[in-house]
Image: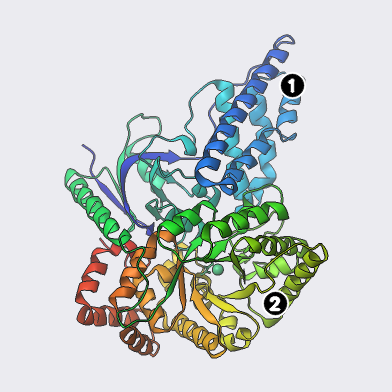
């Protein structure tokens, strides 16, 4: 009987999963080198071609499955792998290797692949790492088909598995199949990393940042062994339990049924209004990355899309996404959400999503988001024209990310005017009065918010980045994760300043960072007179429950008090105290529902 082992990490996607561990490593199967005779060469080339064709058929099937279930934008991630199959540097080079060096197909392919990967391995950016993941994934399929062996891919694991990996890249997380993947645990990653955001959007419980995880597992169950290992992923508390005891399993089975009941209760609130006991209404919208999530937003009771992160449209492809493709995708979301608004954020590239050839020592402070778009007029104009063209299909708004200087906003608006002129010249219809807003996510923008407010139609506060830039804490760096706290009074004062500035100039102010999913964040923001909160769809019923359970007057008074405080701990303790006394029932509910409270206290058990 194995002893249970409890490992701590960061809970980034709530929920509990009990399942068998599947270790995901981007490795290739082993093979032997064989020298060929002259007559064997055509046979070996045929063997290689067959494997390529089989792989192509598998990928096409997978792509179709994904397209049906999750939409054409996500299926595009598989197109990248399909295009790699016939990449001349891999395909033709392998055929040539077999012919000239007279070596067996698996050996030839692997040797060519090694060479192909050298420049990518030397690159340090996530974009290249993602390409390596795609190449390794497709290559292991090819090798498996040459060798005729089973090698489970991340997309084909048995239902109920818990994926354990050193890291999951956003493209891999995007394709996680909820029907098969019960939970995820990784060694690296941060709370607001895009992989964490993806796991939450898919409602797959996830704990990340567990140091030395794979080694610990292979110490219990060696790789060669066929024995399976049971585990529990507790996304609320940020723990992974290997070989859980019967007592522990009983506890978690009860937890699962308790959470399921809560979910049913919360879901009964989804069509309710988000209005406080004393009548203050807040707009609740959803954050999405993919078209398919718009349906989920509606089903959870969202009254709009507050943030459509569009950069995945670019990262998913090997080639630029065309204006027509974008128009189609934005139109699809606009139609699903009509008459509700859809805020399309222009490409937020850079940070952890870097294009090839643009690696930087300090990417979050570098050529990111609006900075990169303004320097790439074609890319930016294509996107703006696509949004404008799609605007006839619903209620679309344009949102510009990472504005830190007024010049950027003014220049971006000039581009928007140019795009409008170009469309008019071609008599292409669009919404002439489309609103243009900005994300307030840099301290400079939050501090000078009143000067930005006169230049745009709305603000949406990006609390993830605003916290990172205000506290000088990398949002993806585990070592400093304990310093990353939305409740820091410096962050809260900037948020309040932004809301006040917006209102003084008659524009509405929303917040679309993870803070809008935090129960305490929701209460504080309501008190600060936020107009809109945007969050992952599954949190919407909880947000409604909280808003309906408090008084606006109480929230206002609470917000005023915490703005005077000096530390995040003081703020937390004060809210704990006030809620316990004023709304004991709600506090009890929230304590029980630590499930949704993953952004605080997630390491205690
Ligand atoms: C934010 O920074 O709060 C935000 C919503 O944008 P992203 O997480 O995509 O940077
Ligand atoms: Mg941001």
Say which residue appears at 34% left-offset and 36% top-offset: 221
Rendered image: mark on residue 408: 2
Please state if 491 lies on the left or on the right of 159 as rendered: right
At numbered mark 2, what does the secondary structure look like: helix, strand or loop?
helix
* Outermost residue toward the left in this view: 247
Q: Is mark 1 within 8 Å of ligand 1?
A: no
Looking at the image, tell me whether mark 1 or mark 2 is earlier in sequence order.
1
Tell me the CA gap for discs 1 and 2: 56 Å
Question: Where residue 457 appears, x then y in whole percent?
Answer: 60, 79
Identify the image quadrant of the N terminus.
top left
**Quadrant occupied by the C terminus:** bottom left
Work out whether residue 394 or residue 412 is closer to the camera in this orientation and state it: 394
Residue 490 point in image, percent of width and height: 46, 83
Residue depicted at 48% across the width and 54% down the height: 295
Percent x, y of residue 382: 73, 60
Name the quadrant containing residue 389.
bottom right
Looking at the image, residue 279 lies above or below residue 363: below
Which picture quadrant has residue 345? bottom right
Q: Which residue is mark 1?
A: 101
The image shows residue 207 at horizontal and vertical percentages of 38, 54
Give 597 or 328, whichever is nearer the viewer.
Answer: 328
Residue 545 at least partly seen: yes
Display colour scheme: rainbow
Label 1 secondary element:
helix
* Residue 311 or residue 124, whichever sits in front: 311
- On screen, residue 367 above or below 459: above
Q: Nearer the viewer, mark 1 or mark 2?
A: 2
């Amino acid at each position: 009987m194995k002893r249970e082992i409890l490992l701590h990490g960061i809970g980034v996607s709530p929920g509990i999963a009990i399942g068998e561990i599947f270790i995901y490593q981007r490795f290739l199967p082993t093979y032997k080198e064989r020298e060929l005779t002259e007559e064997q060469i055509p046979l070996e080339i045929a063997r290689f071609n067959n494997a390529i064709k089989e792989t192509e058929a598998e990928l096409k099937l997978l792509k179709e499955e994904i397209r049906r279930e999750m939409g054409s934008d996500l299926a595009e991630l598989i197109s990248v792998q399909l295009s790699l199959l016939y990449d001349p540097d891999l395909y033709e080079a392998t055929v040539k290797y077999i012919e000239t060096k007279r070596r067996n197909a698996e050996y030839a392919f692997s040797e060519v692949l090694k060479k192909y990967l050298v420049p990518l391995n030397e690159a340090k950016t996530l974009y290249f790492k993602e390409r390596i993941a795609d190449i390794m994934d497709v290559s292991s399929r090819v090798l498996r088909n040459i060798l005729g062996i089973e090698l489970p891919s991340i997309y084909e694991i048995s239902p109920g598995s818990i994926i354990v990996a050193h890291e999951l890249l956003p493209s891999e997380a995007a394709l996680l199949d909820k029907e098969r993947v019960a939970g995820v645990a990784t060694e690296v990653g941060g709370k607001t990393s895009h992989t964490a955001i993806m796991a939450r959007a898919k409602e797959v419980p996830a704990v990340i940042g567990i140091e030395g995880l794979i080694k610990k597992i292979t110490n219990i169950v060696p790789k060669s062994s066929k024995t399976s290992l049971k585990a529990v992923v507790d996304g609320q508390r940020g723990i992974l339990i290997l070989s859980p005891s019967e007592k522990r399993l009983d506890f978690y089975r009860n937890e699962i049924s308790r959470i399921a009941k809560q979910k049913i209760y919360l879901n009964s609130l989804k069509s309710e209004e988000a209005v406080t006991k004393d009548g203050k209404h807040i707009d609740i919208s959803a954050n999405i990355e993919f078209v398919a999530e718009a349906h989920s937003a509606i089903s959870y009771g969202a009254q709009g899309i507050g943030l459509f992160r569009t950069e995945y449209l670019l990262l998913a492809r090997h080639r630029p996404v065309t204006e027509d493709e974008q128009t189609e995708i934005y139109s699809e979301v606009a139609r699903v959400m009509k008459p509700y608004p859809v805020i399309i954020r222009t490409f937020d590239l850079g940070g952890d999503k870097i294009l090839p050839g643009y690696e930087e020592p300090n990417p979050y402070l570098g050529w990111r988001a609006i900075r990169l778009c303004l320097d790439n007029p074609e890319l930016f104009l294509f996107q703006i024209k696509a949004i404008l063209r799609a605007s006839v299909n619903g209620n679309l708004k344009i949102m510009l990310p990472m504005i830190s200087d007024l010049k950027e906003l003014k220049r971006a608006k000039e581009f928007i005017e140019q795009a409008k002129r170009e469309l008019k010249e071609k008599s292409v219809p669009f919404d002439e009065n489309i609103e243009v807003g900005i994300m307030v996510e840099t301290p400079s923008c939050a501090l000078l918010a009143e000067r930005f407010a006169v230049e745009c139609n709305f603000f949406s506060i990006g609390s993830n980045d605003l916290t990172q830039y205000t506290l000088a804490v990398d949002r993806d760096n585990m070592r400093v994760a304990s310093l990353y706290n939305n409740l820091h009074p410096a962050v809260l004062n900037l948020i309040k300043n932004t809301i006040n500035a917006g209102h003084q100039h008659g524009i509405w102010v929303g917040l679309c960072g993870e803070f809008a999913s935090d129960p305490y964040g929701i209460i504080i923001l309501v008190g600060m007179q936020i107009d809109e909160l945007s969050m992952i769809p599954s949190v919407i019923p909880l947000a409604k429950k909280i808003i309906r359970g408090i008084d606006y007057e109480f929230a206002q008074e609470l917000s005023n008090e915490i703005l005077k405080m000096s530390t995040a701990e003081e703020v937390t303790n004060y809210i704990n105290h006030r809620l316990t006394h004023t709304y004991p029932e709600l506090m009890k509910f929230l304590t029980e529902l630590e499930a949704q409270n993953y952004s605080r206290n997630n390491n205690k058990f």
